[in-house]
Image (cartoon, rainbow, N blue to C red):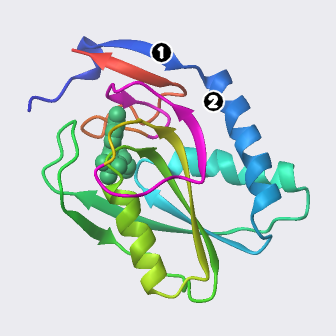
Amino acid sequence: MTPIIPSSSKLEILISAGEISGRVNALAGEIAQKLPSDLMIVSLLRGSFVFTSDLIRALHMAGTGSIWPQIDFMTLASYGRGTTSSGTIEVVRDMTEKVDGRDVLIVDDILESGRTLAYARDALMQRNAKSVQVAVLLEKPGKRKVDITADFVGFVIPDKFVVGYGLDYANYYRELPYIGVVTP
Ligand code: 5GP
Ligand code: MG
């Protein structure tokens, strides 16, 4: 597939920076209420780094001293990705912290087929995490190929390929402060 070169593409805003920020704060409130204070956050790279960095600061504000998350990262990839998911998930870079006996919150950018999150959840359960919950910024409904539901969802979006706020196309657009749709 030919990469869409940012300068020659049109960007449409789907979710503004202000909307994202309001929703991330609300989500942090829910998480701070429901999850234990000694929480291990596993952020799935690369797409979720922006969401994670806003979420953990919102968690601090929402929890005001009652939630003390620890953060680690895991890079997963699925083979043959264009703008649709392929089947096989691969660990590109593993986390370094131990999760046995820990309450874990996986943070990802978007839930589509569910393969990425199901893989991560199963891997962490196999490592004897005490509990594994999932927070995603975005969810595309009706696209699930495996059985997984997110415990915390920022926005349910239409079935369009979105970029920005950490999400990429060909590693472009991650820096956008909003969620957008690209047209070449
Ligand atoms: P799943 O494994 O649930 O099919 O897909 C999850 C992963 O696919 C996400 O972490 C993300 O990397 C990628 N993905 C799915 N939909 C989109 C999209 O609309 N835009 C972008 N940039 N990535 C997507
Ligand atoms: Mg991803």
Q: Which residues are drawn in magenta?
A: 145-166
Circles 1 and 2: CB atoms closer than 8 Å: no
Q: In the image, what residue occupies the spot 39% across and 30% down?
A: 163
Relative placement, left or right, of 4 versus 100 is left
Numbered tag placed on residue 20 in the rendering = 2
Ligand 1's quadrant: top left
Q: Which of marks 1 and 2 is nearer the N terminus?
A: 1
Numbered tag placed on residue 64 in the rendering = none
Relative placement, left or right, of 183 versus 2 is right
Task: Give yes or no for residue 151 being in the magenta stretch.
Answer: yes
Secondary structure beneath dot 2 equals helix
Q: In the image, what residue occupies the spot 63% across and 30% down?
A: 20
Rendered location of residue 5, percent (x, y): 22, 23
- Alpha-carbon span between mark 1 and mark 2: 12 Å
Relative placement, left or right, of 131 versus 179 is right
Which amino acid is tagged 2?
Answer: Ile
Task: Give yes or no for residue 142 being in the magenta stretch.
Answer: no
Which amino acid is tagged 1?
Answer: Ile
Residue 63, picture quadrant = bottom right
Q: In the image, what residue occupies the spot 52% across and 88% down?
A: 128
Residue 37, picture quadrant = bottom right
Q: Is residue 41 above or below residue 57?
A: below
Q: Name the residue under label 1.
A: 13
